[in-house]
Image (spheres, grey):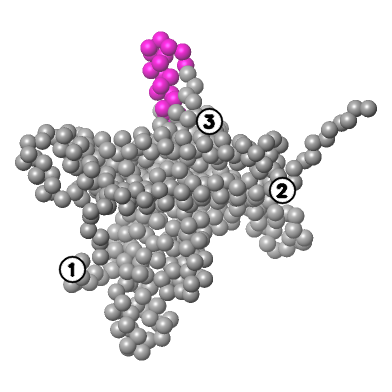
Amino acid sequence: MIDIIVQAKPVGIEWLSYSPPGWGRNLLQGLASTIQIAIGAYLLGTTIGLLGALGKLHGGPVTRFVLEVYTTIIRAVPELVLILLLYYAGTDLLNRSLAALGYERVDISGLAAGIYVIGFVMGAYATEVLRGGIQAVPVGQIEAAKAYGMPFWQRYRRITIPAMIPFALPGMANLWLIVTKDTALLAVVGFTELATVTKQAAGTTREYLMFYLAAAALYLSLSLISTVFFRWLERRYRRGQAVPA
Amino acid sequence: MDWSWLPEYGPKFIGGIWITIQLMVYSLIMGMSLAVPIGLVQVAGPRVLSWLALAFCTVIRGTPLLIQLWLIYYGIGSLFPYMEGIRESWLWPILREAFPYAIFAFTISVAGYAGEVMRAGFAGVPKGELEAARAMGMRPFTVLRRIWLPRAVQNVMPTLANECVFTLKSTPLAATITVFDVFGVGTMVRQETYKIYEPLLFVAGIYILMTGVIVLLFRWLENRVPRPRVSSGA
């Protein structure tokens, strides 16, 4: 006799189990990609933001104008539109320059493209946050550094940036939360991350409500954990500062 | 750049702009009306209500709007057809459309973000003004209507302008649940004409213009509200 093993179709919450036919593993992998994209985009955005802030504060008229256009346009256009524009324009540009150099076309991985797209958008917001942070550093501290004869970069590295961190941290923490949520928009371009995986899972199993609730719970725990982390970081960097009354 | 498609799709874009404006205005009005009690109970409400309001704001602000929208449209929306007798009821023509789900999702989103803003606004009104109002014999509701709410709104005016721009910028998400707003029309043009950049740039331009209008509107509104002449010296 041959036993036919009929795998029982999962019911309700069983769809979330880690092993197939449950989708739990896929959801967690999606969450991992989301976190990777978010961290990459955050680092890229912070770098752009730092350069942008320096450019806005010390650059010539042309640099300042270009940066003003960048931050204004990015902040006025919906992220969804920007993501599509940057994605197509970015891949186009890359492939054209590769072709001009005599290389084959490449398909950019979802991870790299996602980081570049979200990071570029975040850079505009980070520029403003960091510029505000730098301007909040008491002038006396910078003048003191100048008086010691520190050159520009050394002054920034030793004085301005460390002194700016407490002022910029609340804004930068907020940006991290925005970036983690913005990665969900990549689902519209079809990159593999949590929202895309959820969409696939919900569509395949027809358990829409449960999967979207599960995804919401994952995003929520990510932002709650991040909030706790940034609160700790802020306390650390505010050591020795007067507590605002 | 080839813009020859523009005359043909122009009327559709006008319709799309109108849908976008409706999405924004409806969800802002309803979301703000919800944000007032949500902010108020966190400052002056009983413990249970204040805790509930805080939990609501945390959940809304901690999850992506796209997920909320899909949860409401695909998740909750998929339950309705199975309900007894709902197809015959007057609600069915509404529940069948995507537009009301988008309005609902954006409304609770505005309520969550603006609720947090209003909390700060209510908390920022000097106690003395409220005490003065009570000393004049105003009932609690009159204090709220005449003093507390107007002063709180005045406090948060700049943040509210950001909130409006933020809401405008979230409306294109509605296109992912088949609502034909500006972005949805742009997507349609992209699919029908196989052009990538022109429709996207055109849509981006429309959003930039609309953001500009909102910013100017709020600047005008803020100038209309008389400012206290004596600064508090903070």
State which chain disc 2 sits on.
Answer: A
Q: Residue B179 location in percent, x, y? A: 57, 47
Q: Residue A167 location in percent, x, y? A: 26, 50
Q: Residue B137 location in percent, x, y? A: 36, 89
What residue did someone put label 3 on?
B193
Q: Outermost residue, bottom direction? A: B137
In whole angstroms, how far apart are the C-alphas of marks 2 and 1?
60 Å
Q: Residue B69 location in percent, x, y? A: 56, 50
Q: Amino acid at mark 1?
A: Gly
Q: Nearer the viewer, residue A94 or A32?
A: A32
Res A201 seen here: no
Q: Nearer the viewer, residue A213 or A99?
A: A213
In the rendered image, the quadrant that contains the N terminus of chain A is top right
Q: For the point 13% across and 44% down, which residue is it?
A: A142
What residue did someone put label 1 on?
B233
Judged from the image, the secondary structure of the residue bearing numbered disc 1 is: loop
- Have a look at marks 2 and 1 and say if they share a chain: no
Mark 3 / mark 1, whichever is N-terminal: 3
What residue did someone put label 2 on?
A12
Q: For the point 34% across and 58% down, which residue is it?
A: B159
Q: Nearer the viewer, mark 2 or mark 3?
A: 2
Judged from the image, the secondary structure of the residue bearing numbered disc 3 is: helix
Q: Outermost residue, top direction? A: A102
Q: Amino acid at mark 2?
A: Gly
In the rendered image, the quadrant that contains the C terminus of chain A is bottom left
Q: For the point 21% across and 34% down, which residue is it?
A: A63
Which range is magenta? Answer: A86-105
Residue B53: mark in rendering: none
Rendering quarter of residue B121: bottom left
Q: For the point 25% across and 60% down, which residue is it?
A: A243
